[in-house]
Amino acid sequence: MRVAVPQFWGSNCDQDALHSLRDDLGVQASYVWYEETSLTSFDGVFIPGGFSYGDYLRCGAIAARAPVMDAIRDMAHAGAPILGVCNGFQILCEAGLLPGALLRNESQRFSCRDVFVRAAQQESLWTRGIEGVLRLPIAHMDGRYVCDAETLRELRGGHRIAYVYCTREGRLDPAANPNGSLLNVAGILNVKGNVLGMMPHPERATRKPFGYEDGLRVLSAFTRANIAV
């Protein structure tokens, strides 16, 4: 498995993404610059968090129009595993690879803390075998997931809500929702199930010396995809 980590001006979680994949998960990972137009030497993509282009216009709006996104679209349509975390989630929505949008947190404040999430289903590459509650960090100002009623019906009916914010015990509770997202949504999938966007940062939870390793359970989808191939 060879995973591309795109770098945009202003990205600041690219190193976390690279090292979690390469050093903790044991897969090959390399940076690719935003001007790259071909990713044929890669099997998957991890679009990292950060504040690409300073969040000007809208979060992810400029990065979504970078040359590398055409190559990422090609990989997504071919069924390759694509993960977008935080700003990466915003970029996927702006690029049309995922529906809906990420708006300002309900609190109108930047939120940086640990949250609890659980898989809402286990039918996709990104959630298969993930049981129980995961503890993951968040760090965002614009993480409130919204979409229209029809899109929400499609997400629910197609089992495309991947992760939801929950209590430590796994209960859905508005108090466990850090940003006001619809239905406590923390992450969603595309129709094929190979593209995941999520606001929590699994790449920051991959080593016990740093607190916990729950993020590896999410990132391990890259290795499962390699086995499937």
Image (cartoon, grey):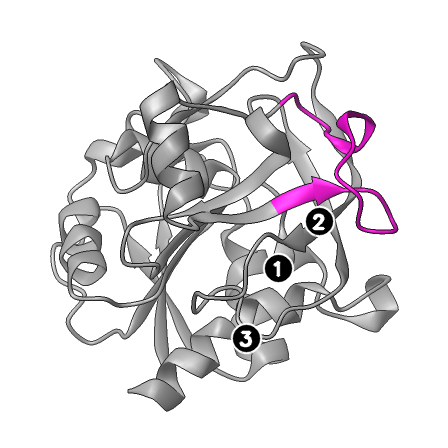
Q: State the SS at label 3.
A: loop
Residue 85 seen in render: no
Disc 3 marks a residue whose amino acid type is: Ser
At a point 45% along the width and 45% down the height, the residue shown is: 188
At a point 31% along the width and 25% down the height, the residue shown is: 61
At a point 27% along the width and 68% down the height, the residue shown is: 80
- Asked whether 161 falls inside the magenta stretch, the response is no
- Quadrant of the rendered structure where residue 104 is? top right
Badge 3 is on which residue?
Answer: 220
Q: Alpha carbon of mark 1 to alpha carbon of mark 2: how far? A: 15 Å
Circles 2 and 3 in contact, beta carbons < 8 Å: no
* Front label number (3 vs 1): 3
Disc 1 marks a residue whose amino acid type is: Glu
Q: Which mark is residue 84?
A: none
Residue 161 seen in render: yes
Disc 2 marks a residue whose amino acid type is: Val
Q: State the SS at label 2.
A: strand
Name the spot of residue 21 as percent of width and height, x first.
53, 72
- Which quadrant of the figure contains the N terminus? bottom left
Circles 3 and 1 in contact, beta carbons < 8 Å: no
Upstream in the sequence, badge 1 or badge 2? 2
* Front label number (1 vs 2): 2
Which span of residues is magenta-colored? 164-180
- Quadrant of the rendered structure where residue 110 is? top right
Badge 1 is on which residue?
Answer: 203
Q: Residues within 10 Å of mark 3 (few under 14, many from 20)?
A: some
Badge 2 is on which residue?
Answer: 117
Q: Alpha carbon of mark 3 to alpha carbon of mark 1: how far? A: 11 Å
